[in-house]
């Protein structure tokens, strides 16, 4: 759904941020700090 007003954009952005926050909150701190094959972590 495309936002056509500033308030609609804010509402959509908040919903999408809430989804991302839920996903990130589910990641264990130790797992997030674990380095991958390319020496990167989240």
Image: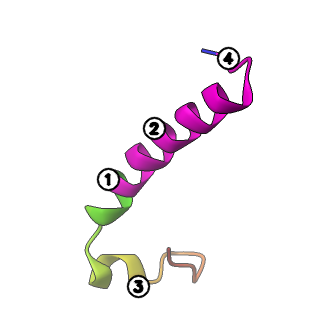
In the image, residue 25 above or below residue 39 = above
Residue 14 magenta-highlighted: yes
Q: Residue at x 64, y 31 (%)?
A: 7
Labelled disc at residue 15: 2
* Disc 4 from disc 2: Cα separation: 13 Å
* Disc 1 from disc 3: Cα separation: 18 Å
Q: Secondary structure at mark 2?
A: helix
Judging by the rendered image, the residue that carries numbered circle 1 is: 22
Image position of 9 (left or right of 15): right
Q: Secondary structure at mark 1?
A: helix
Label 4 vs 3, first from the N-terminus: 4
Q: Residue at x 57, y 83 (%)?
A: 39
Label 1 vs label 3, nearer the camera? 1
The spot of residue 29 in percent (x, y) is 30, 81
Q: Residue at x 39, y 44 (%)?
A: 19
Judging by the rendered image, the residue that carries numbered circle 3 is: 33
In the image, residue 3 above or below residue 39 = above
Start-end of magenta stretch: 2-22
Residue 10, can we see it? yes
Looking at the figure, which quarter contains the N terminus? top right
Label 2 vs 1, first from the N-terminus: 2
Which residue is nearer to you in this view: 3 or 42?
Answer: 3
Label 4 vs label 3, nearer the camera? 4
In the image, residue 40 above or below residue 9 = below
Mark 4 surroundings within 10 Å by alpha-carbon count, few (fewer than 14), some (14 through 19), many (20 or more): few
Label 3 vs label 2, nearer the camera? 2
* Disc 4 from disc 3: Cα separation: 35 Å
Label 1 vs 3, first from the N-terminus: 1
Label 1 vs 4, first from the N-terminus: 4
Judging by the rendered image, the residue that carries numbered circle 4 is: 2
């Amino acid at each position: 759904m495309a936002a056509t007003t500033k308030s609609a954009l804010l509402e959509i952005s908040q919903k999408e941020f809430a989804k991302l926050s839920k996903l990130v909150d589910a990641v264990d701190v130790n797992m997030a700090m674990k380095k991958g094959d390319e020496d990167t972590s989240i």
